[in-house]
Image (tube, coloured by chain):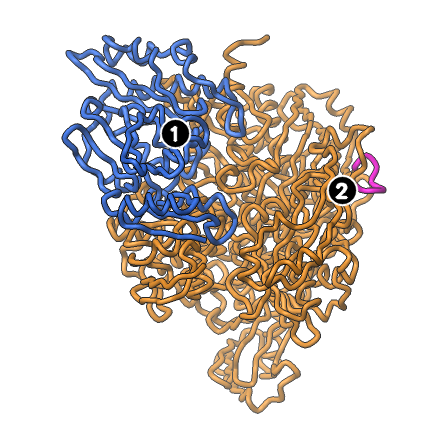
Chain colours: A orange, B blue
Amino acid sequence: MSARLTLTVNGRAYAIEADPVARLSHVLREDLGLRGTKSGCDAGDCGACTVLADGVPVCACLMPAAQAGGRAIQTVEGLSSNGTANRLQRAFLRHGAAQCGICTPGMLMAATALLDETPRPTRQAAEDAIGGVLCRCTGYTKIIDAICDAWRDADDGTETPAAGQSVGARLPRLDGLPKVLGTEIFGADSWPTDALLVRAVRSPHHSAGFRFGDIEAWRSGQPGIVAVFTADDIPGQNRFGVIPPFADQPALAAGHVRFRGEAVAIVAGEPAAMRALDLTTFPVDWQADDPLLDTPSARQPTAAAIHAGRDGNLLITGKVQTGDADAALAASAHVATLTAETGHVEHAYIEPEAGFARMNGDVLEIQACTQAPVMDQEDTALVLGLPKEKVRVLPVAAGGGFGSKLDVSLQPLIGLVALKTGRPARMVYTRPESMMSTTKRHPGRMTATIGADADGRITGMVFDGDFDTGAYASWGPTVATRVPVHASGPYRTPHYRAEARAVHTNGPIAGAFRGFGVPQAAILQESLYDLLAGKAGMDRLAFRRLNALTDGERSVCGQEMNGAGIAECLEALQADWDRAVAETEAFNRVHTGPKRGIGVASCWYGCGNTALPNPSTMRAGITTDGRLVLHQGATDIGQGANTVISQIFADALGVPLSLVDRIGSDTALTPDCGKTSASRQTVVSGKAALLAGQALREAVLRLGNMGPGATITLDGAQLLLRDGPALRQIDLSALPPDDRGYVLSAEETYDPPTEALDGNGQGKPYAVYGYGAQLAEVEVDLALGKVRVLRITAAHDLGRVINPQLAEGQIEGGIAQGLGMALMEEYLPGRTENLHDYLIPTSGDMPEIRSILIEKPDPEGPMGAKGLGEHVLIPTAPAILNAIADATGVRLTKVPALPHRVRAALREKEAGPS
Amino acid sequence: MTYLRPSTVEEALSGLAAHDARIAAGCTDLFPQTQGQFLPWPVVDITGIGELRAITRTGDGWRFGATATWRDIIRADLPPAFDGLKLAAREVGSAQIQGAGTIAGNLCNASPAADGVPPLLTLDAAVEIAAAGGRRVVPLSAFITGPRRTALRAGEFVTAVLIPESAGRGASTFLKLGARKHLVISIAMVAARLELEGGRISSAALAVGSCSPVAQRLPDLEAALAGETPADAPGLVSADLVRGQLAPINDIRADSTYRMDAACELLRRALRRLAEGDRP
């Protein structure tokens, strides 16, 4: 149905033919081409599509187009003029309020409604105004900072540090402007006009056999449906996986599904027909089996095998052992044991998976959101039976990733349609589809015992955990390997035995999620440290400081530590700890209903793959017309790789950052920088950028026959080199360019030096580690079991701070995710496949956050730098749980600590020992 | 698919009669029922009927037009007896939902967790329904008959929510408990309105939501509070006095034991807040 509608958007009248009951967001994006308005959930749960209707913020996804007629609609495109950011947008840039940028348009519009009425709002008013817009990256702090500062007629914070001064500068992100203008291209924002729309038929069952009916009859009865594809149509190997030896996941299931949401067929057709299509009529019969939905049932000897050849549904066991842990525990003055349980956690990025594929000659091009372009290229080529070079992956801006966009999702599906039909194929996941079919954090069921001597020194530890890896392998092996390496925490643990198993179930596929299992293990270890400190009669922070790993000591893998900054992080918390102890005691003396408590927890985290190669290659060149180009292939998913890597490169070359022209990630144009995971991009790709910058500098100086101290300036096609009185001018246009058009170029590869782990997990799993410790202050409403986190002080050792604003953004965002994991996030397949039943923190749930950036240089990292992205989440949940225990005397060992769980634990305590 | 946007109640009724249509207003509950980009049902959109948007003082009380939004209610000039309703309005979803969602939509959607229902119960609200034969008025307590069920018959729709003069007295409040601050479906919520005479409670209206298939008034507790001082009221709340009306369930948000405890605790807090004279 369509009708003539006149919409007034940003002051311009549009007369269009549109369905009057189409979502306004759809009409804005698809009919008017105003794609700054984002769709995150189509249910009013995320607010990404916020627009103003006669000045009132509304969700464009919930407004029928007809209702927008006669109202003045304002979208993000109306904020700027001719590409010039307005005050609020400049404030967002200046404060680092946009990370991935997918929620930014919604945030800007919600804030605009507030600022139109209240130009200088309080923080509380700003927090309330954005309460209906979810952000998964920032932790909201910098967004609120920006809103409160938008009244100032200030610039966007861009300064041009002099040559050699970029590293360490508080620079706004280099790719920030399109994010605040709403012009950034995300997965759903660009498509060829003749693209087919693709939808998937997915299993409603956790485990089922299935049989198709007459698909061709069904298809031919549906006008506009061009093609249907099933497993039979897959030309290559219908089995992919991020770790090739474990590859086990079909692009389209064949005969049997192993989890709810698994795709069995895809339907492609003309967009209008596809949108109107009722997929529940698709001819498929399901024979549901009894699913195995948790690790205890999957490990039963009688349990059905989810994958042939994986006995006991065991995917893999990871193990680290040193010394004699049992003997050490037996001889310990103090011993504590706990069991802890964590649930599925959903990444809940605001951008559901989206992208398109098309044939360009005989090359299949895929433009989609991703964290790992080259892995997408390899897996897609494998599934489609193409040579790798016949697949080109062009990553768009990722609207959040956090680990889940490492695995392919729609890439092989849209690739199959483009390959088979010859037409471009576009797919946009719905929110439930995204939540159902993509990976989650591994639920953990863990038991550990830790011992200490009479002085409070750790003697030994035994850890044992089952991690629910779900239906397919994904990153299960990584979790099983990483957990035993890290479960000691950054503490001296002379005797140690840790085992982690990745166990298959028919639950959601568990994969990579910020921390790869380490956040789960840290909950257990840091809880035990509190118990041991209590037994030893020691202050909890002092206990940790006593046991902190220091340089020259060996980790549980036998690796000699260098640049270990945990002691410095814990020391940095001491003053706030002392203040918080006093304030909490004072509060609790006069209050009975609410009780306050404080908790501390640490993290360490190895950057990059565990004892496996993971090189990055960076290329740079100077063209005949004096353009300095950096081929930066590390995917920026909001964390800031584009900015940080450019800063390192500029300083290594010795030029101002403003001279660096960046070519973004594209498998045809940028060398492989590996995946954006494992907190590796600053360390590994950053080091490659450092080496490439240094190599290019050498080439330049060699050309000019200048000494190492010379300065480099580019003025059009003139390269100017100065060293004291010596001056050399080189006309670049007179030099012969290479195949890529460069007269000077460099390409450098860096692979962090690690050593394989032996059967006891002994070796050198990582070249660089990062460290951190967080202090949480909470208030618990005893009668209702509600926990409010008041403040988190976060000390993180970055080795070298490349960009303090981006580092703070990582810390604040990681804390938000850690807080969610501790207090509210629990994904239940079939029950919480949306963003109103699955809760992530809103602006009103965040504590005050104070970041302390520590610089203890790493001998291996670029300019001493260490990774940060995952570290920041690890201490948050255990610090909060320790603070709850401090406030209430009740230790929660199952997260999330929902109000009813806290209250049940309190009731049990009030009832006394049974 | 039919889409009608009439400008009068009569046109809306004839549209409803001619098509098997759903009434649409703010659409904040309709659109989430589909994953598609269009409302997949025939729709009669009543937001074009100007008279249904107003909030007015009538000769015998207050009239909230069916399409008055929660934002309209927050910004309306209303006496303290409506404070609880305003507080609830601020808790509906988010500012974006409050700007589109309507008072009648909240009732017709008939969620056990509808934020508007407990305060409206304490305001003795009634629902005005237009039908081909004329308009009828049904008490709110009889309008919502179960989860997602109302007393609306085919061809009818809600035109207004009516508050009687007698309910405009006293002061009221509202408390919502959820696992996060914004955009949250409640675990439990309470509304309370107290009228005082000579420093004692002459009339108490209390309601609890999310703890029974339909939000409930608490007649036993209300009776127990009559004649007591506001300061004593919180101490008189007991599970025995509310158990008869509530039937909390176990779900992903909480268990039934917790909900019963929380309802009592929230009632105590609401009464304490009223006793202390805190106004939002």
Q: Please provide the residue range marked out in magenta.
A: A307-313
Depth check: A708 or A693 in front? Answer: A693
Local crowd size for mark 2, using a 10 Å CA cut-off: few (<14), some (14–19), many (≥20)? some
Query: Compared to A289, does A85 lie above or below?
Result: below
Q: Quadrant of residue A859?
A: bottom right
- Is residue A690 something that shows in the picture? no
- Is residue B64 something that shows in the picture? yes
Chain of the residue on which disc 1 is drawn: B
Are discs 1 and 2 located on one and the same chain?
no
Residue hosting label 1: B151
**Residue A668 locus on image (x, y percent):** 65, 71
The amino acid type of the residue labelled 2 equals: Gly
* Residue at 25% in and 31% down: B162
Residue hosting label 2: A209
Local crowd size for mark 1, using a 10 Å CA cut-off: few (<14), some (14–19), many (≥20)? some
Depth check: A377 or A60 in front? Answer: A60
